[in-house]
Image (cartoon, rainbow, N blue to C red):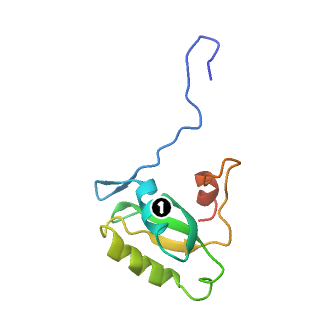
Amino acid sequence: MIDKSGYLYYLGRRKEMIKVKGMSVFPSEIEAIIGHHSGVIGCGVIGIPDEERGERPIAFVQLDAASRGQLTEKELQQWCERQMAIYKAPLIKFIDKLPLTTTGKVKKQALQALL
């Protein structure tokens, strides 16, 4: 947006990097790793405040039909802990359907509303 004085303002850009105990965690890296799990259709990762860590990643995960009822949030979280650095391992929350834009990207703001 450009105001009446000609100043340019960037709108809609927001911080996505998550800081866990001073370490940088990129949601896209976690999403890519979780995407390799055979029961996962897709996921979106955001940061949530955490008193001890500063922030903590939380992954909203959509499972395929065969994995629903077979895979638990705890099991997927433990799988994540084996696949990535422990400080990157997210909390897991299963959702029925990821909120997507018309171009197929996960709407991160809509995930915030699910907390």
The relative height of residue 36 versus residue 3 in the rendered view (above or below) is below
Residue pushed farthest right?
Answer: 102
Question: Of residues 103 and 47, which is closer to you in this image?
Answer: 103
Where residue 84 sits: x, y (%)?
33, 68
- Counting from the top left corner in percent of width and height, residue 38 is at 51, 76
Measured as percent of width and height from the top left, residue 37 is found at 48, 73
- Location of residue 64 (image quadrant): bottom right
Please give the count of numbered marks on the rendered protein: 1
**Rendering coords of residue 48 (x, y %):** 47, 60
Q: Nearer the viewer, residue 43 or 1?
A: 43
Question: What amino acid is found at the position of numbered circle 1 in the picture?
Answer: Glu
Quick one: which residue is furthest to the top in this view? Answer: 5
The answer to which image quadrant residue 87 occupies is bottom left
In which quadrant of the rendered view does residue 29 lie? bottom left
Q: Is residue 49 visible?
A: no
Q: Quadrant of the N terminus?
A: top right
In the rendered image, which residue does mark 1 sit on?
A: 31
Q: Is residue 90 above or below residue 10?
A: below
Give the residue at the far bottom of this rendering: 70
Residue placed at 65% from the left, 12% from the top?
4
Circle 1 crowding by C-alpha within 10 Å: few under 14, some 14–19, many from 20: some
Is residue 64 shown to the viewer in this render? yes
Q: Residue at x 55, y 77 (%)?
A: 39
Give the structural element (helix, strand or loop) at label 1. Answer: helix
At 67% from the left edge and 55% from the top edge, which residue is drawn?
100
Position of the C terminus by quadrant? bottom right
In-image side of 101 versus 22 (left or right): right
Q: Residue at the spot x=39%, y=80% of the render? A: 78
